[in-house]
Each structure stands twice: as C-alpha cells, then as structure tokens.
Image (cartoon, rainbow, N blue to C red):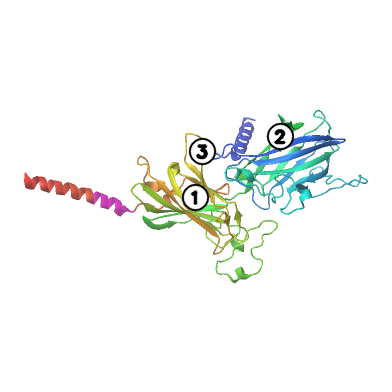
Amino acid sequence: MKFFISVLFLFVLFSYAAAYDPLDPNGNVTIKWDIVSWTPDGYVAVVTMNNFQMYRHIMSPGWTLGWTWAKKEVIWSMVGAQTTEQGDCSKFKGNIPHCCKKTPTVVDLLPGVPYNQQFTNCCKGGVLAAWGQDPQSAVSAFQISVGLAGTSNKTVKLPKNFTLLGPGPGYTCGPAKVVPSTTFLTPDRRRKTQALMTWNVTCTYSQFLARKNPNCCVSFSSFYNETITPCPTCACGCQNKNNCVKSDSKFLKMVGLNTPRKDNAPLLQCTHHMCPVRVHWHVKLNYKEYWRVKVSITNFNYRMNYTLWSLVVQHPNLNNVTQVFSFDYKPLVPYESINDTGMFYGMKYYNDLLMEAGPLGNVQSEVLLRKDKDTFTFKQGWAFPRKVYFNGDECMLPPPDTYPFLPNSAHQHLSFTRFTFIAAMFFLFVTFW
C-alpha cells in the first residue's frame, strides 16, 4: 500500500512539474466566458482567449477549443468562430441550431470572411501571438448564443472537460471557475457596463505531452577552435529517417512538395540529427570590453514555414546585451533578481517568417555583449548557452564535454610568456647586481 501511495505521489508531482516552465512560470492560455445577455432559453456569451505565454505562440492551422455541456445545451448561433460539426439536430423543427453536439469543437474563422460573420479579435485562422512578442495579437474572441440552458446565475451550469489544441496536443485545461464579472468600457469610454456572469478556464502547456522527442537541436562553434560541435545524432528521434529527402534529390523539384498535409506530417531533409530546426551559436569575435556571437536558425522541414517564430536563450551574459543587429530582442525576467534569459524574434515584415527548408530556409543575426570582468571567460564552455527554446519548445544541446575548448597551445603560450618574463628579470638582476 505504501509503495502504491509513493508511486501515485510521484506521478502527480511529475504531472504538475511537466506543465511548469521555469522560464515562464506564469505562462498560460486563459479562456474567459462573459454572459452579456439572457435569452428566453439561455444566454449570449463572449468567449475570449488570451495567450499569456511570453514566448510560446499558437501557429497555423490555429487553436481548436472543445468542451462538454453540463446539460442538454445547444449552440443556436456563433459569430467569429464555428463548430467543426453540427451534430444531430433532427428533433428541432424550423429554426435549426448551429450545433447540437454534447461535445462541440470550435475553431476560429479564416481572414476575409464576410463582415457580418466577424467579431472583435476574430478571424485570424486561430493564430495567437505570444504575449511577450505582440500582446495585441495574443487575443482571440467569438460570440456564442446558447440554448436549452439556464437563464439566470443560479440555473446556468458551467461547461466541463475543456480541451485546447494549439494546434497539436500539449495543453491541459483546468475546470471552469466562476470569477468576478468583467467590466467593459463603452466606445466613448464614459460609461462602464458589467457582464452578467463570468467564468475562467486556465490551460497550461507541457512539452512532455506535446511530443516524446525534441523539435529542435543546437550546434556550437567558435573562433578559437576549428572544431564544430554538431547536434547530437538522432537528437529529435530518427523515426523519419526512412522518409527524409537528400538536399540534392530530384524529388525536391516536384510541384506541391511544400504543401502541408492535414496530419502535419513533416518532410525532413536527411541529416544526422533529423530535427526540423537547428539553432547554431557561433562565438565570433573577442574585443577588449565586448564579445560577439552569431546566431543562425535553419529550417529542415520542406512542409513547414514558421510565422512569428521566437528563440529563447539562457546565458549569464544576457544581462549585458549591447546590440542585436537583425532580430528584435526582449529580456525575460521571470525572477527579478536574475536577468539571464532573453527572447529573440524576427523583425516584422523583414525576417519574422522562417521559410521552409531550402536556400531561403534560415534566418541569422549577431549579438554584441559587454563583458563582465568578474565572470567572463572562454574556458569550460562558458560562452555557450545553458538552455535554448525554439517556438516555446526546449532544444537538445550537445553534451558539455564536446563543446569547443580553448586550445592547449594557449595555455602553453601563456606559461611560456610568464617563464620568459621571470627569466629575463632574473638575468637583468644578476647582470646589474
């Protein structure tokens, strides 16, 4: 019995830990339901989805939201979103509901839908930017009219079993909780109105639930060593090894090669690491008071381009970033006493799109950092990052013992210089004594 309890405790502990991101401890997606009016058999609500994650966005084909009705509710109509299935509405005569399923699945509308189907912050194909990257684009909303439901705060039953795909698995949603009603400002900002009832649902992300293998890897190089430390072999698993394409293959000339599949199955370039994305960190130059790094991101997936990509790096010298040349940069300070993490992302309309694998499938920038004389060193791999995340998922780093190291000749030369100086001083002392 004690063994069973211990295993259960560890399982629960691991489950909570898996959804906790130490670099973004407060990151989550919050879904808010605001009932704005009552109807004869239910209510009209505004559903707002806020992505409060600092560096993890929801990319195309976008979010998918699901839940289970507590009673026999139906959706009469929706504005700004739609359900993927109508379900069995055969018992209704005349006015047919938009959806009669017990477990509706809702998706965002695509851009360009007719004006009368649009709602504030809707119709972006389900794409949600990260809060730290673009807060105004980190919101999505739609309006829903619910029937066969409660018509007061006491009779309304909250939906349950919420699910969120963003766009794939990885999110776990908690139960709906009633919270203080949301207040709204009128367009002239002179009057406040209040929702009749509000409840929140909080969803958190876990990379362990999203995929069993990493989605990216990291390689290193430096000016002081000719050795290039590559990504680990099969860093992202080698399950796609038999379906990969060589970079010089005639297959790449086929029409429609870059068209994504419905199941989002990748088509990877054949590499030893078999990762869709590789991040390369090159220690480029050393100055008296500064040092310079070149960062390159390469896409090896022929069926995927990454919009609104982000790169998060943890390194102790990021507390002294002087200039970033071709990326936008924002420090991430989840703990006020520690400033060692930063987010790099593309400049809008310049390089915020990482193209599919091929000649254009890479972006790069250089970073100038000011040295801290108390901590700076090139020894023991100090110049390389501790953690790297691409689009919110942690990348696999090479083993520390393979990092580019300072050549032994540097130490020998240093020792020889000191010996020469001491010998010369001794010779002068003997000569002039």
Task: Give yes or no for contact between labels 2 and 3 (Cβ–Cβ under 8 Å).
Answer: no
- Label 1 residue SS: loop
Name the residue that disc number 1 marks: 397
Please name the residue that numbered disc 2 is placed on. Answer: 184
Q: Earlier in the sequence, mark 1 or mark 3?
A: 3
Q: Is residue 388 left or right of residue 221?
A: right
Mark 2 is on which residue type?
A: Phe
Q: Which label number is shown at residue 373?
A: none
Asked whether the beta carbons under mark 1 and mark 2 sit within 8 Å of each other, the answer is: no
Crowd rating for badge 3 (residues with CA inside 10 Å; few <14, some 14–19, many 20+): some
First to last magenta residue range: 407-416
Q: Nearer the N terminus, badge 1 or badge 2?
A: 2
Which of labels 2 and 3 is toward the front?
2
Image position of 414 (left or right of 190)? left
CA neighbours of label 1 inside 10 A, class few (<14), some (14 to 19), many (20+): many
Rendering coords of residue 98 (x, y %) = 83, 46
Amino acid type, callout 3: Val
Residue 316 appears left or right of 89: left
- For the residue pair 148 and 241, the one nearer the viewer reads as 148
Identify which residue, 239 or 326, lies in the foreground.
326
Farthest bottom residue in view: 250
Earlier in the chain: of badge 2 and badge 3, it is 2
As measured in the structure, the alpha-carbon distance from the residue carrying label 1 to the one carrying label 3 is: 22 Å
